[in-house]
Structures are given as structure tokens and as C-alpha cells.
Amino acid sequence: MIDISPVTLWGLIVLLGIGTFLIRYSFLGLIGDRELPEWLLRHLRYTSVAVFPALIAPLVVWPAATGGEAEPARISAAVVTLAVGVLSRNVLLSIICGIATLYGMLALLG
Amino acid sequence: MSSLYLQGLRQGAPFLLVTVPFGMLFGVVATEAGLNIAEVMGFSLLVIAGAAQFTAVQLLSENAPVIIVLASALAVNLRMALYSASIAPHLGPLPVWQKAICAYFLVDQTYAVSVARFEKDPALPLRERFAFHLGAASLICLCWYPATWTGAVLGARIPPEMALDFALPITFLALVAPALTSLAHVVAAFTATVLALAFVGLPFSLGTIFAAGCAMLVGARVELWQTRRREAAR
């Protein structure tokens, strides 16, 4: 459960909103169509493939819902989602296959 | 109504299949984590970035300090600086208030739809580019709010057997998988995974930021190394 004061939470929401807007406005608004330095672009290209896996790896291997125990249904669902996503490059299809695997395995392992 | 606005609407429509369930899921997860409906809607209206919203709620429920939550959620959104840079040649000459509107609505899906359209037809007048981007944003972004609201209202009624905790990893995995297009991307994702697991014991989810930072450096190094090797082979 989230345990911080409403004021802190709203402060966070507002700052996150401003920060996100500034990121989106950055080049469009301030820098116009000038080119970004190549070294910066090179690092930015890996933002999403770096942040998302770092965020979800512990959730997959030690899910909170099982009290932090590795569990076959969730691990197979993750493997299937990733495999279908890599092969099909279709976000929706891999979500559907992942959820089907999760529920299938949960029902099977009961 | 401009025909380019309608074109934007039409080309953005398929993405509703992703954003509506994703928005509902955010409402459910955030409500289950203890946020009230006003706070859930505050996130969706002010931040309007699904992945960052999930990141913030996930870290908040792990009791990470607010500054870490803020840094991690903003890091998730850094990719949007790339979108901003890439769409700047097309929308850059607009007046400031119109650029601000475009920036607010610059999410993964609207970016993908708009940049594809603008590159296909470079002669498109500026006003029509703006109309197209607004059209794409109208469906994709304006459905985000009612979707999260619906999820927040339904939230408490969803039983734990639904294993909703796992909808988040599945959604993120599905978003990352198609991006694994080169050796550098694969190595970066692998680095992030291994380091995040190795440093899971660090307080305040510092392991996540550390792992992501290292993975970005590694990805960039691999790319540089490959480029140099290709040039040397020539």
C-alpha cells in the first residue's frame, strides 16, 4: 500500500507532469530543428530497452503476489510474451498470448 | 472540420486497442495500491504517460522516496525527448501555444502515427500537420482519461485470482520486445535485466536506476563498436 501524505503525492504528480511536459516540449519548442549531438542520441536510443527490463525483471522473478517466490505460471507468461513480441513485433498479440499463458498455467497448476 | 484531422482520427483509432485496456489497468493498479480517484485522474491528466504512471505507482508501493520515484518515472519518459527531436522538423515552425498542445499529446502512439504521415508527405502544409496530429491525439489521448477512470472505479471489485499484478510486466514486456531490433538493443536489455536482479537488494529501488543507466551506456558502446567494425571492414 502507498503510504505518503496527500500533499506529497500531489506534489509528485504535479512535478512529474511538468517534467514530462518539458521532456516532450524540449526539442520541439526550445531547440527547434537543430540536430542533437550524436553521442546523446546514441544513449537515448537505449532508454526504453534499458528502463523497462530493469523495472520488470524483479517483478517477474520474485512477484509480490506470491510473497516473493519464483512461480512457473508468471515466468512462462513472461517468456511467451517476450517471444511472441520479438517474433511478431505485435504489441497487442503478445499481450494476449502472455495473458492466455498466465491464466492457462494458473488453472493448470491450480 | 479539416480532412487531415479526420485522417488523424482514423489512423490513430487502432491504437485504442492498446491504450484503453492499458488505461483501465492503470486505474485498477493505482486504486489497489491505495490512491483515490482524484489522485488517479491527476496522474492521467497531468502526466498522460502510461509507463511513467505505472513506474511511479509501482515504486510508491515499494515505499521508495519521492525523489527516486520522480527520477525513475522521468527516466522512463526520456525516450520522448527523442520523439520531440524527431518531430521538431515537422511541427517546429508552429506558434508556441500550438507546439505546447502538440507536446502535451506527444505519446508513443501519436508520435508513431504522426511521424509516419509527415514523412510520407513532406509537402503537407504546416496547418494540416497540426490538424493531423490533433486528430490522432483526439482518440488516443482523450480516451485515456475515461479509461483510467473506469479502471479506478472498478478497481476494488477485481479479485486477486485475476493475477492483475502480472498485467504490468506483461504489458511492458510486450512494449519492449518489438524494440529488440539490433544486437545493441538486445545486449542493453540483457544488461538491464541481470543488473536489476543482482542489485534488487539495494534500498529505494536504486538498483533499477543503476541497472538502466548501465544498460544505456552498454547499448551505446555496443552500437559504437559495431559501427566502427563495419567501417573498418569497408
Image (cartoon, coloured by chain):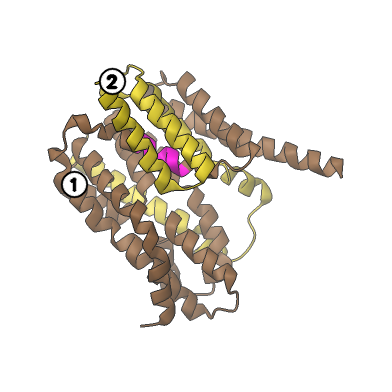
Chain colours: A yellow, B brown
The residue labelled by disc 2 is A109
Instruction: Indicate the secondary structure of the residue bearing disc 1.
Output: helix
Residue at 54% of width from left, 44% of height from top? B179
Residue B130: % across, % down = 45, 74
The residue labelled by disc 1 is B152
Residue B159: % across, % down = 16, 33
Residue B30: % across, % down = 24, 41
- Is B105 rendered above or below residue B37? below
Instruction: Indicate the secondary structure of the residue bearing disc 2.
Output: helix
Residue at 42% of width from left, 21% of height from top? B200
Give B228 or A86, whichever is nearer the viewer: A86
Numbered disc in front, either 2 or 1: 2
The region drawn magenta spans: B168-175
Give A34 or B17, whichever is nearer the viewer: B17
Of all residues, the one furthest to the bottom in this rendering is B1
Give A69 or B77, whichever is nearer the viewer: A69
Check disc 1 and give the amino acid type.
Answer: Ala
Asked if the magenta segment contains residue B121, the reply would be: no
